[in-house]
Amino acid sequence: MVEKLKKTPQKQAVSGARTGALELLHQLFQHPEDTTPLPVMLARYGQEADLGRQDAALLAELVYGVLRRASLLDAALAGFLKKPGALSAQVRMLLRLGTYEILFMSGIPARATVNELVNLTRRRFGQGLGGLVNGVLRSVDREADALRLAVEEKLRRLESGELDAEGMAEAASLPLWLAKMWDEQYGTAQACRLAVNTLAHPAPCWRANMARAWGEMLVQHWVDKGYVPVGQGGFSAQGLEKSRAGAAREQELLESFEKRGDLTRQGATSQLAAEYLAAWMERQNLMNAPLWDACCGRGGKTAALLEKGVHVALASEPSAFRLEELKAALLRLRLPRPRLLCAPAEEVEESFPLILLDVPCSGTGTLARNAELRLRLSPERLREAARMQASILEHAWTRLLPGGALFYVTCALNGEENENRVEAFAREKSGRLVEKQMFLPAFPGQDALFLAVIRKDA
C-alpha cells in the first residue's frame, strides 16, 4: 500500500506594509520617549524592508490611521473582547490594525485583511492567538455597518461641538489632559473644532519662489488646474483626489518645478505667517533692516522671507543636519545666502534690529501632521518647552537693538506658550506687544500657528 504524501503547510505571505505597521506602532506606543520623527521612521523602515511605492503608501496610511483613531478602534473592539487587558500589546495592536482596515479602508477586501493579519499572528504568536484574531476580526467585519454608524455619530457630535473633554479625547484619540486644556482655554466649541482638525490628512501645499519673475504665473497655472490658492504666493492640493485623471503627471511636474527651485513644499499656515511678517516689515519700512532668524530649523520661513526681499543677515540653528538642509534649499532656490551659524540662540552675542524666534514648542498645533505626538506629549513636555522658550526669549531680548522688533512664533495651541507667555514677557521688560495673531488651519489638517510682535522702546 502506497502511503499518500502529505502536503507541507506553507507559510502564508504577509505584506511588508502590515508587518512594518505592527512593528512601528508597537514601538511608538511602548516608547513614547523616542523623539524620532515619524516620517523618518517610515522612510527608514521602507528602505530596510525594500518596500515598493504602493507598500510604502499603505504602511504610512496604516500607521497614521491607527494613531488618529486608536481610541475609536478600542471602543469598537470592546464588544468582542472579554479581557482585552489580558492580551499582549502586540496582539491588541494587530486587532487595531485589522479593525482600522475593515472600518476605514474601503479599497481593501475584509477577507484579505483578516487572512493577512491572522497569518501574521500565527507566525509570531502561534495558532491559538491566530484563532482569536480570526474570530474577533470576522466579528468586526460582520458588525462593520453598525460600528461605522457608531463612529460616524461620535464624529458628527465632535464636528457639532457637542462633546465634553472625555468625548473629545475618545473621538480624536487625544490625551485626556490635552482635551481638557483645550476645553478650558478655548471653550468647548472651538476645542472640538481643533480636535476635528487633528483627524484630517493634510493636503500638500507649495510656495512659489516669488523672487523669480514667473512666480505669479506659476501660481495661477496651478490654480487654473483646480488647486486652491494659499495667500499671495502659494497653492494647495486640498480637495483634489489622488486617483483623479492626470494626477500622476501633475505630481511629476510639481517635483520637477521643486528641483528647479521654482516651488517649495510648505504648509499653508507657515506661508501665511511669512507673508504676514514680510507685510509688517514693509509697512514699517524695515525690509532692509538686518534680521536674525534665531531658531531657523530647516529654514522654511528663512527662505520664504528671503524670496520676499527681507534682509535675513544671520540664520542660526543648533542642529547641523537641519542647517545643511537649509544650505541645500538656498542653493536650489538660488537665493542670497545669509551667514549661517550652527549654535543655540543663547550663544549669539551680536545685536540686531529684527529678531525672528520660531521657538521650539510642544507642537500641539501640528497633531494632524505629527500624529505620533498624541503619544509623546505630556504636561511635563509642555512645561519643558515653556522653560526653553523663556530662556531663548530672555537672551534674544538682550540682543535686540533699541527700537527693534522681536517676532515670536510657535506651532502650539497652549496659552502658556503663546498669549500668556508674550503678555507676561512684554510687561516684565516694558516692551510693547504691538501684534498677536493666531493662524488657525487654513484647510483641514494644516498646522495652527501663533505669532506675536514685541517692540523695544528706542
Image: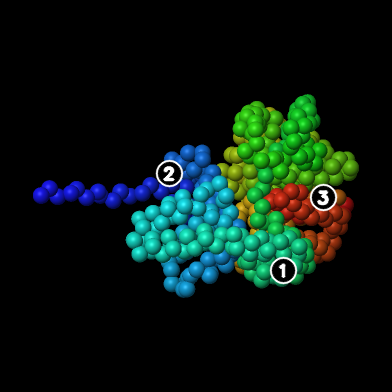
Q: Position of residue 7 (x, y in %)?
A: 25, 48
Q: Which mark is residue 405?
A: 3
Relative placement, left or right, of 388 versus 400 is: left
Identified by mark 1, the residue type is Leu
The first of marks 1 and 3 along the sequence is 1
Residue 312, quarter of the rendered image = top right
Residue 118, quarter of the rendered image = bottom left
The Cα–Cα distance between marks 1 and 3, rounded to whole angstroms, is 41 Å
Q: How is the image coloured?
A: rainbow
Name the residue beneath numbered marker 1: 163
For marks 1 and 2, give the one nearer the viewer.
Answer: 1
Q: Which mark is residue 174?
A: none
The Cα–Cα distance between marks 2 and 3, rounded to whole angstroms, is 50 Å
Question: Compared to 7, does 50 lie above or below?
Answer: above
Q: Tell me which residue sits at (35%, 64%) in the image.
A: 128
Name the residue beneath numbered marker 2: 49
Q: Position of residue 163 (x, y in %)?
A: 72, 68
For marks 2 and 3, give the one nearer the viewer.
Answer: 2
Q: Tell me which residue sits at (85%, 61%) in the image.
A: 430
Identified by mark 2, the residue type is Ala
Is residue 311 in view? Answer: no
The Cα–Cα distance between marks 1 and 2, rounded to whole angstroms, is 42 Å
The first of marks 2 and 3 along the sequence is 2
Question: Compared to 300, does 331 lie above or below?
Answer: above
Q: Secondary structure at mark 1?
A: loop
Q: Position of residue 224 (x, y in %)?
A: 77, 32
The one of 56 and 151 positioned closer to us in this rendering = 151
Relative placement, left or right, of 226 versus 36 is: right
Disc 1 crowd rating (10 Å Cα; few below 14, some 14-19, many 20+) is: many
Q: Tell me which residue sits at (85%, 45%) in the image.
A: 280
* Residue found farthest to the left: 1
